[in-house]
Amino acid sequence: MSHGFELAPAKGPAVPDNPTLAKISRLLDRLNSLLLLLSMWALVITALVLTYSVVSRYFFKLPTDWQDEAAVFMLVGVTFFCTGYVQSYRGHIGIEALSSLLPPKLNAVRLFLVDLISCLFCAFFSWKSWTLFHEAWVDGQTTSSTFAPPLWIPYGMMALGISILTLQILIQVLAHITNKPADQRSAQ
């Protein structure tokens, strides 16, 4: 059983054997890397916004009413924008207790089923997120604070992020189906 710390870091996301899937995977990898960079900057900006809020309240007795929602909105974006990147490296939490007990072929079936179920769940989550985004956009929904930013912003980031995750998992599911078995790949 692996705890992760003894593993060598991955050199990059696994590239599918199928040329079309490989091309889509590389494009998705570029998008994921861009969103990761954007998310890093958003975390820094969030830290600065919250620090400003604390300093202005404590030292200058100046209340701010926008910093909490701005920070939450950015954290929603960071959370959902990074999910596809993490999935491309298979970095999401997984329980490996069965992997060491199952024969390799049965473990491959287990991995495929987990990916398939994850893809279906994320597709449903994506659809519901786009529904929330659409409702917030059409109805002009805002938060109930005096700052009142539009709710389509966090819903849009959530919908885009989970859609990218769904696409990432779908590519991995299709790679399960189209990739050559490991013994055939090493023979070439």
Image (cartoon, rainbow, N blue to C red):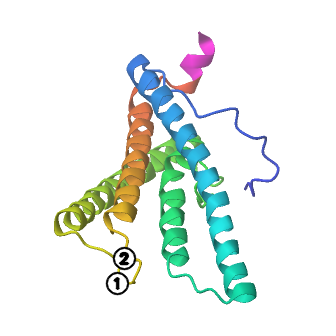
Q: Position of residue 104 (x, y in %)?
A: 58, 41
- At label 2, the amino acid type is Ala
Rendered residue at 60%/42% (across/down): 89
Q: Which numbered marker is on residue 144?
A: 1
Q: Main secondary structure of the magenta part?
A: helix
Badge 2 density bin: few <14, some 14–19, many ≥20, Cα 10 Å: few
3 shown above or below 23:
below
| Mark 1 neighbour class, 10 Å CA radius: few under 14, some 14 to 19, many 20 or more | few
Locate residue 153, reporting x and y percent: 37, 61
Front position in the image: 88 or 138? 138
Which mark is on residue 148?
Answer: 2
Q: Is residue 101 left or right of residue 112?
A: right
Image vertical order of residue 14 relative to residue 142, above or below: above
Q: Residue at x 27, y 61 (%)?
A: 133
Query: From the image, which quarter does the N terminus lie in?
Result: bottom right
Q: Quadrant of residue 124?
A: bottom left
- Of residues 181 and 91, the one nearer the viewer is 91
- In depth, the one of 97 and 94 nearer the eye is 94
Q: Residue at x 62, y 17 (%)?
A: 186
83 left or right, relative to 59 = left
Task: Check disc 2 and report its element: helix, strand or loop.
Answer: loop
Q: Is residue 187 magenta?
A: yes
Quadrant showing the C terminus: top right
Give the residues in magenta: 183-188
For residue 85, above or below residue 157: above
Q: Residue furthest right?
A: 6
Do callouts 2 and 1 mark residues in contact (Cβ within 8 Å)?
yes
* Up-down relation of residue 58 to residue 125 (above or below): below
